[in-house]
């Protein structure tokens, strides 16, 4: 006899709102809307390959990556579910060069939605798990239509964040600052059901995730750190397996549930670009908020991701995220040997926003 309660994500979100007696319901509605978008995108992702949707568009996004039709579909769904609700003052999507204003004919609200509609989309054609990443800030400008200032806030100010992973099953994992909770989609009824309440990242790690193909570019500190994780450094206390799928949501989700660390470091391959590949606003902020809520830690190698004051919508950031002691050990190795990289990256990290 199964004893676990059947809790839909909608009921879970509502129960979380009840802890805030003055809540207007706008935030709850926003979280419902994100869950709805996830259900619709999941349907399309699971049909990818059965229609010509897999073909690549001719457009490229700001990063020079070809946008796949599923990217654009997911981006469009999330926007059209959220643009008219009066809950948001401005939207920011990883697929758009600039912030996306709420259309003039629609009312605005007090929240900011940032999202990567389909992260890891280069894996679509090879049927590797991909994901949607989202983050919610509260507006800080007094203006009706939100501005870049409302978007470029540190992750420490986030109201909520989460991701959807389209894998062997579709799961939505989110936090509103009251712990991290995972829901598995039952496609027969179209409901996300609570399957992973109060997720805590295990203290005993199992994996590290890094693209070993870039080892030739890594700083000395990162090389020593990964050797330490592998158990071949003189001070090693772990001997972890490498699991790297090239899709942040999938790699992060596995390490969140099993314990471990994801590493996408910066390097000095191009001295004026010491910041690695990950997107601060569309990948790192949400994952850093979640992992801290689950007892872990996220660093750019210098300090907490949560504390970074963003200076650009498409700012890049090195990302070392997972079990707290593993991430802090990375900072230790970097401090020991990577002074040149620290100086170059800190100059980029501490830039002030142009015109907020
Ligand atoms: P690489 C996808 O483009 C992404 O931003 C993350 O989802 C993923 O972790 C990373 O890039 C993979 O990058 O350089 O190892 O292929």
Image (cartoon, rainbow, N blue to C red):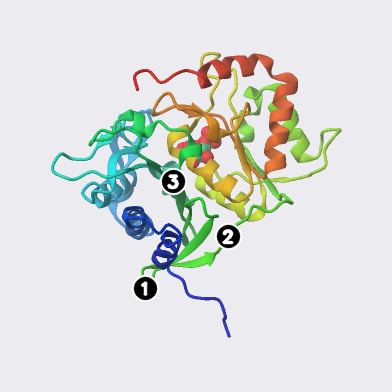
- The quadrant where residue 212 appears: top right
Secondary structure under the numbered disc 2 in the rendered image: loop
Measuring from the top left, give residue 228's x and y in whole percent.
77, 35
Q: Is residue 242 above or below residue 15?
A: above
Cα distance between the residues tagged 1 and 3: 29 Å
Q: Is residue 51 above or below residue 96?
A: below
- 337 vs 117, left or right, is right
Residue depicted at x 30% and y 39%: 91
Secondary structure under the numbered disc 1 in the rendered image: loop
Is tag 1's residue or tag 2's residue first in the polypeptide sequence?
1
Residue 330 visible to the viewer: yes
Residue depicted at x 63% and y 45%: 296
Q: Nearer the viewer, residue 208 or 152?
A: 152
Q: Nearer the viewer, residue 91 or 21?
A: 21
Secondary structure under the numbered disc 3 in the rendered image: loop
For the C terminus, the image quarter is top left
Measuring from the top left, give residue 270's x and y in whole percent.
54, 16
Residue depicted at x 61% and y 32%: 213
Measuring from the top left, give residue 96's x and y in whole percent.
31, 34
Cα distance between the residues tagged 3 and 2: 17 Å
For the N terminus, the image quarter is bottom right
Mark 3 = which residue? 159
Q: Which mark is residue 189?
A: 1
Q: Which mark is residue 198?
A: 2
Is tag 3's residue or tag 2's residue first in the polypeptide sequence?
3
- The quadrant where residue 37 appears: bottom left
Cα distance between the residues tagged 1 and 2: 24 Å
């Amino acid at each position: 006899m199964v004893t676990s309660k059947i809790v839909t994500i909608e009921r879970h979100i509502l129960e979380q709102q009840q802890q805030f007696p003055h809540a207007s319901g706008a935030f709850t509605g926003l979280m419902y809307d994100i869950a709805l978008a996830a259900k619709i995108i999941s349907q399309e992702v699971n049909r990818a390959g059965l229609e010509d949707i897999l073909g690549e568009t001719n457009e490229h996004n700001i990063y020079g990556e070809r946008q796949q039709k599923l990217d654009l579909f997911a981006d469009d769904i999330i926007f059209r579910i959220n643009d008219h609700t009066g809950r948001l003052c401005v939207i920011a999507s990883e697929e758009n060069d600039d912030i996306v204003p709420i259309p003039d004919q629609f009312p605005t609200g007090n929240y900011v939605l940032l999202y990567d509609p389909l992260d890891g989309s280069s894996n679509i054609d090879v049927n590797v798990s991909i994901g949607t990443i989202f983050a919610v800030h509260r507006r800080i400008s007094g203006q009706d239509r939100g501005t870049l200032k409302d978007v470029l806030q540190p992750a420490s100010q986030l109201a909520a964040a989460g991701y959807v992973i389209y894998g062997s099953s579709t799961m939505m994992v989110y936090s509103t600052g009251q712990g991290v909770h995972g829901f598995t989609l039952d496609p027969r009824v179209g409901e996300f059901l609570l399957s992973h309440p109060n997720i805590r990242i295990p203290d005993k790690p199992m994996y590290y995730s890094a693209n070993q193909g870039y080892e030739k570019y890594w700083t000395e500190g990162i090389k020593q750190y990964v050797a330490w994780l592998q158990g071949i450094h003189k001070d090693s206390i772990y001997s972890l397996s490498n699991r790297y799928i090239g899709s942040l949501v999938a790699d992060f989700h596995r390490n969140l549930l099993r314990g471990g660390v994801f590493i996408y470091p910066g390097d000095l391959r191009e001295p004026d670009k010491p910041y690695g590949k990950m997107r601060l606003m569309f990948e790192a902020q949400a994952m850093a908020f979640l992992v801290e809520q689950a007892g872990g830690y996220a660093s750019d190698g210098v300090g907490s991701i949560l504390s970074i004051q963003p200076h650009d919508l498409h700012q890049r950031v090195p990302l070392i995220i997972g079990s707290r002691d593993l991430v802090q050990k990375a900072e230790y190795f970097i401090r020991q040997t990577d002074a040149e990289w620290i100086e170059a990256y800190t100059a980029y990290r501490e830039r002030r926003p142009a015109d907020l």
